[in-house]
Amino acid sequence: MVEEEKNYSKNLLGKTVVTKTGKRFGEVGNISFEVRTGELMEIVLKNPTTYTEGLDLEKDDHNNLTIPYSAVIAIGDFVVVSEEDIL
């Protein structure tokens, strides 16, 4: 029986968010999720780079830049996102 490795959302906090081409977006500051289902919805960026501030990203109620969780490609040492799915 193979045991799946679980990625708990709290383990994502503080990880650097990069695109698949290596552009740095910032760090994971928080994650919003659907309470009823537990589905992860958005990554809230902290310490956004000047590159991300120049993009037309969505913002939350506190004016923080957000990235839809559906844009996440991989999670390891970094959270890798698809820039095409964000813009």
Image (cartoon, rainbow, N blue to C red):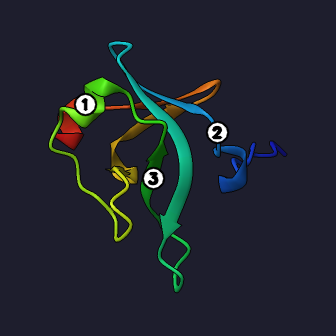
Q: Which residue is identified by label 3?
A: 44
Q: Which residue is identified by label 2?
A: 14
Circle 3: is it few (<14), some (14-19), or many (20+) Cα within 10 Å? many
Q: CA distance from mark 3 to mark 2?
A: 11 Å
* Residue found at x 27% / y 24%: 51
Q: Amino acid at mark 2?
A: Gly
- Quadrant of image for the C terminus: top left
Q: In the rendered view, would you say 2 is above or below 22?
A: below
Residue 6: image location, x then y, percent:
73, 48
Q: Where, by quadrant of the figure, is residue 52 drawn?
A: top left
Q: Where, by quadrant of the figure, is residue 5 drawn?
A: top right
Going from N to C along the chain, the mark reached first, 1 or 2, is: 2
The residue lying toward the viewer, choosing from 38 and 50, is 50
* Residue found at x 33% / y 60%: 63
Q: Amino acid at mark 1?
A: Glu
Mark 3 or mark 1, whichever is nearer to me:
3
In the picture, measured across the screen, residue 23 lies left or right of residue 2, that is left
In the picture, measured across the screen, residue 52 lies left or right of residue 62, that is left
Q: Which residue is identified by label 1?
A: 83
Numbered mark located on residue 28 in the image? none
Q: Amino acid at mark 3?
A: Val
